[in-house]
Amino acid sequence: MTNEELKETMMSGEPVTLRGMTFAHISAIIYRKSDSGMYIQAELMDKNKNCVVLARPIEVERAGAAALKTEEKQ
């Protein structure tokens, strides 16, 4: 996902997927400073709302988009 897609998805509260697992929603977008510049992480809330996972935005997809990709492969 791009930065804009992350923001849209976070504001809508829709579910997302990461590596085949579905998460309730994006709970935060984190900007981190490193020696080589700055990078972004998406904080994903699990379905039970007990924990979060940090992910690279490029690996995060809207749950509906991931389902469509799976159907296309079959």
Image (cartoon, rainbow, N blue to C red):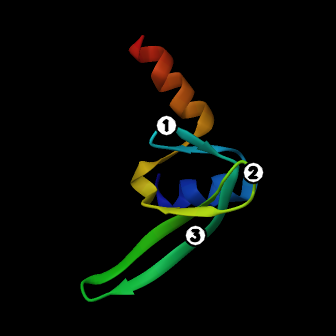
User: What is the three-letter code of the residue carrying label 1?
Assistant: Gly
Q: Which residue is mark 3?
A: 29
Q: CA distance from mark 3 to mark 2?
A: 20 Å
Q: Which residue is mark 2?
A: 48
* Contact? badges 2 and 1 (CB < 8 Å): no
Tag 3, which secondary structure?
A: strand
Left or right of residue 63, residue 14 in this image: right
Q: Which quadrant holds residue 52?
A: bottom right
**Residue placed at 75% from the left, 51% from the top?**
48
Residue 36 screen position, x and y as percent: 24, 84
User: What is the three-letter code of the residue carrying label 2?
Assistant: Asn
Q: CA distance from mark 2 to mark 1?
A: 17 Å
Residue 51 screen position, x and y as percent: 66, 62
**Residue placed at 50% from the left, 16% from the top?**
71
Mark drawn on residue 71: none
Q: Which quadrant holds residue 44?
A: bottom right
Mark 1, Cα crowd under 10 Å, few <14 / some 14-19 / many 20+, is few
**Residue placed at 26% from the left, 89% from the top?**
35
Q: CA distance from mark 1 to mark 3?
A: 20 Å
Tag 2, which secondary structure?
A: loop
Q: Which residue is mark 1?
A: 20
Left or right of residue 50, residue 54 in this image: left
Tag 1, which secondary structure?
A: loop
